[in-house]
Structure formats: C-alpha cells, structure tokens
Amino acid sequence: MIIHVNADDFGWNGRCSKAILSSFDAGVITTTTACGNGEYIEEAIAEIADTPHRNKVGVHLVLTEGRP
C-alpha cells in the first residue's frame, strides 16, 4: 500500500510555500496542490521548478477565496 501525504495551498503565500518545500526535503509530504490564484504562485513555481519535486504538484481549484 502506498500512502500519499499532500500539502495544500502551495503558492498561496510565501510562508506556506516555503514550509511545503521544506516538508518535501524532509520527506514529510509526497505531493502538493498549487493555488493558481495565490499571491505567491509565480515565485513558488520558480522555486520548485529545478527540484526533484517539480512533478509532484497538482492543482487546487479555489472557488471561494481570492480572485478566480
């Protein structure tokens, strides 16, 4: 059995995104979902792009927070 631990809200803000990247490196999480309308999304994508975790990012559809 494989269990995936997902961290939500990648890209929502800098603090959350950096915590997610640290959690990847520590082996605490296996995937994340990115908030496309997050204030830090462009920076978060740039930070994960050259890491082994770049293919472990899904999409978090946000319908009730921020700008759609």
Image (spheres, rainbow, N blue to C red):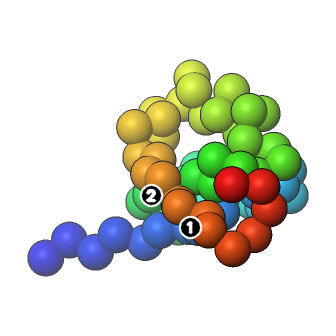
Dot 2 crowding, Cα within 10 Å, few <14, some 14–19, many 20+:
some
* One can see residue 22 in this view: no
Count every numbered label the image shows and give the total. Answer: 2
The N terminus, quarter of image: bottom left
Q: Residue at x 81, y 44 (%)?
A: 40
Dot 1 crowding, Cα within 10 Å, few <14, some 14–19, many 20+:
many
Q: Residue at x 62, y 68 (%)?
A: 63
Task: Identify which amino acid the numbered label 2 is placed on.
Answer: Thr
Task: Identify which amino acid the numbered label 1 is placed on.
Answer: Ala
Q: Is residue 12 left or right of residue 58?
A: right
Q: Earlier in the sequence, mark 2 or mark 1?
A: 1
The mark found on residue 31 in the picture is: 2
Q: Residue at x 72, y 42 (%)?
A: 41
The mark found on residue 7 in the picture is: 1
Q: Residue at x 57, y 26 (%)?
A: 49
Q: Residue at the top extreme?
A: 50
Q: Is residue 48 above or below residue 22?
A: above
